[in-house]
Image (cartoon, grey):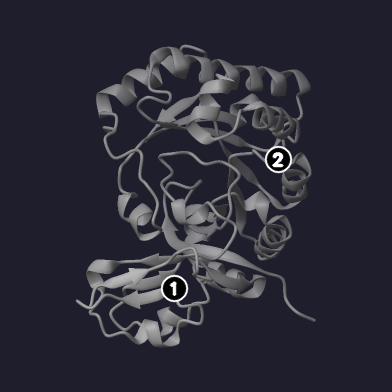
Amino acid sequence: MTSLSGLVCNIQRFSLHDGPGIRTTVFLKGCTLRCFWCHNPESIRLTQELRLYPDRCIGCGACVEVCPTGAQGLSPEGELQFDRERCQACGACVEVCFAGARELSARRMTVPEVVAEVLQDRAFYESSRGGVTLSGGEPALQPEFSYEILAQCREAGVHTAIETAANVRWENLARLMPVTDMVMMDLKQMDPQKHRWATGATNTLLLANARRLVETGKPIVFRTPVVPTVNDTPEEIAAIAAFVREMVLLRRARGDADGDGVGEDTITLELLPFHRLAGDKYRSLGLDYRATDLEPPTHEVMEALTATAAEQGITVHHR
């Protein structure tokens, strides 16, 4: 029997910002949104991709010899030429590129392979009350793969969490809930049309899914990346915080929190400052990085926006 497999962009050990304690974060491929500032553009498409670093190329021509589609080439001057439309991301060129000028954006891994890497740091999870977090991309776009990883980690006594944009069919998210201890969900903008401008989709589906997630009783951290031109005004953050307060009240009314009798305090908001560290990733994928000219919010701005959000009577933190 063939083991279930999926596309994994990265497995990051000793993560400190993707849930409680020391964690291993598994970044899966595929997302339904197209946020123009995305910090992980290699995880957007649900297909394998080739990443190129022309400044590392030594012009040896090995890639040209092994490419089955003719996507790789060298100019008469020995400069790298690449036709991304013809590339099938087979990885043949990666295997012969000793200069490291190309790499695949993801690995196809089986569930046991992923779980084995996660369990290497079990001692750190136990000492810090940490665990494993599935991120992306969107874990719910590979629902069966994600389910099996979470289930096997949970069976091993590891705390499980997912990071989701929730812009997927509810059935996909619901599939993960029985094996998920904690949910971290993005809230980027409350205005549906501005949300479409910033992410490529309205927020109708994800807000409906947020309500369904609240009804599961799972602890939820709503996370807002504070991005200039997208949501960095007090009014926009207040609107997001008001929605979080609505979710707190919904849970309080239902009185059905998951776990050891905790209630509305299991719903919080975290504000995350935008950064510009992803530029090289976009260039390696042949993508335009539209956030180049945006300035990350200062600590003072984050403090002020956190105070604004707290006026809604919710628990809010910022990084």
Q: Please determine whether, in this image, residue 98 is positioned above or below residue 216.
A: below
Q: Position of residue 278 (x, y in %)?
A: 34, 50
Front residue of 127/252: it is 252
Q: Position of residue 222 (x, y in %)?
A: 55, 32
Q: Position of residue 209 (x, y in %)?
A: 70, 33
Q: Quadrant of residue 221?
A: top right
What is the three-letter code of the residue carrying label 2?
Gly
Q: Residue furthest front?
A: 76
Task: Say few, some or many: other residues with alpha carbon within 10 Å of mark 2 (under 14 / 14 to 19 / 20 or more).
Answer: few
Q: Quadrant of residue 36?
A: top left
Front residue of 77/66: it is 77
* Rendered residue at 48%/39% (across/down): 35
Q: Which mark is residue 249?
A: none
What is the three-letter code of the residue carrying label 1?
Ala
Numbered marks: total: 2
Front residue of 231/161: it is 231
- Tell me, yes or no, if residue 22 can be seen here: no
User: In terms of secondary structure, where does tag 2 sit?
Assistant: loop
- Tell me, yes or no, if residue 289 can be seen here: yes
Q: Write down the residue under mark 1.
A: 71
Q: Position of residue 4 (x, y in %)?
A: 72, 71
Q: Please determine whether, in this image, residue 125 is positioned above or below residue 109.
A: above
Q: Residue furthest left?
A: 77
Name the side, left or right, on which 184 lies relative to 208.
left
Separation of residues labelled 1 and 2 (CA atoms): 53 Å
Name the side, left or right, on which 61 lies relative to 110.
left
Sequence-first tag of 1 and 2: 1
Q: Write down the residue under mark 2.
A: 259
**Image quarter in which the N terminus is found:** bottom right
Name the side, left or right, on which 209 lies relative to 37.
right
* Rendered residue at 65%/32% (across/down): 206
User: In terms of secondary structure, where does tag 1 sit?
Assistant: loop
